[in-house]
Image: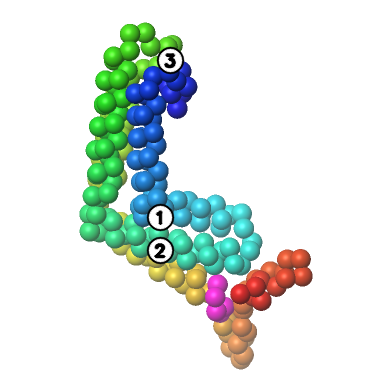
Amino acid sequence: MAIKKLLRRNIDITVKNKELEERISKYENGSEFSAANDLRQFVDLVHNSKSFSDLKEGIEKARNAVSIINQIYSENLFANIDSVHKSVIADLEEYNTILSGIRRLPKGVEKFENEISQLETVLSNIKKKTASTDSEMLAKVQASLEDALLFATEGKSIRVYGVFCKNQQNYGYINQSTKSWEEK
């Protein structure tokens, strides 16, 4: 974007920027990226929120995200990532040819050679994870999230003094005279 601002009169740069933005936004709407974002949001939500409904929704999203990531690693489904990677690399190389055609580049504008090698490194790091240990760990995480979701929705019966059971439930919250369990 900084190059686009510095070279705003060059139509080739403007078109190439739009193509790159479109590829990246298309990938951001994909299942892998949204699963990773759901997990990041869940980690932040657990530390910051005390709302029952937010936690319940976050647990459901995180459980689905772990399932998607487990499927990607266990079955080596990296086709979407590979195709986006190849197209972004091709776009960056075309961007470099456009930049090399300009006689005088503004100060601070450089070609994308380092970024291309960094993308190659990131892709190899993503793929080198071992499927067997990761899938076992992800299965444990998914089971823990399912237990947390079950507790969040139904509560838990706790034996007290071996004589009677105490039912522990989270009833939600009351906000501005509106009860969360009555909203639905």
Residue 182, horizontal then vertical, whole percent: 66, 76
Task: Judge whether residue 171 can be spotted in this image.
Answer: no
Secondary structure under tag 2 reads: helix
- Residue at the image point whose x is 38% and y is 60% from the top: 66
| Closer-to-camera residue (67/1) | 1
| Closer-to-camera residue (115/15) | 15
The mark closer to the camera, 2 or 3, is: 3
| Closer-to-camera residue (96/59) | 96
Left or right of 69 in this view: 56:
right
Residue 72, horizontal then vertical, whole percent: 28, 56
Secondary structure under tag 3 reads: loop
Secondary structure under tag 1 reads: helix
Q: Which mark is residue 108?
A: 3
- Residue at the image point whose x is 34% and y is 57% from the top: 69
Amino acid type, label 2: Asn
Quadrant of residue 56 within the rendered picture: bottom right
Q: List the residue tagged with mark 1.
A: 35
Q: List the residue tagged with mark 2.
A: 64
167 in magenta = no
Picture quarter with the C terminus: bottom right
- Residue at the image point whose x is 43% and y is 15% from the top: 108
Q: Earlier in the sequence, mark 1 or mark 3?
A: 1
Mark 3: few/some/many CA within 10 Å (<14, 14-19, 20+): few
Mark 1: few/some/many CA within 10 Å (<14, 14-19, 20+): many
| Residues at discs 1 and 2 in contact (Cβ within 8 Å) | yes
Q: Earlier in the sequence, mark 2 or mark 3?
A: 2
Q: Which residues are magenta?
A: 152-156
Prevalent SS, magenta region: helix
Up-down relation of residue 117 to residue 61 (above or below) = above
Up-down relation of residue 13 to residue 139 (above or below) = above
Inter-mark Cα distance, 2 to 3: 43 Å
Left or right of 49 in this view: 65:
left
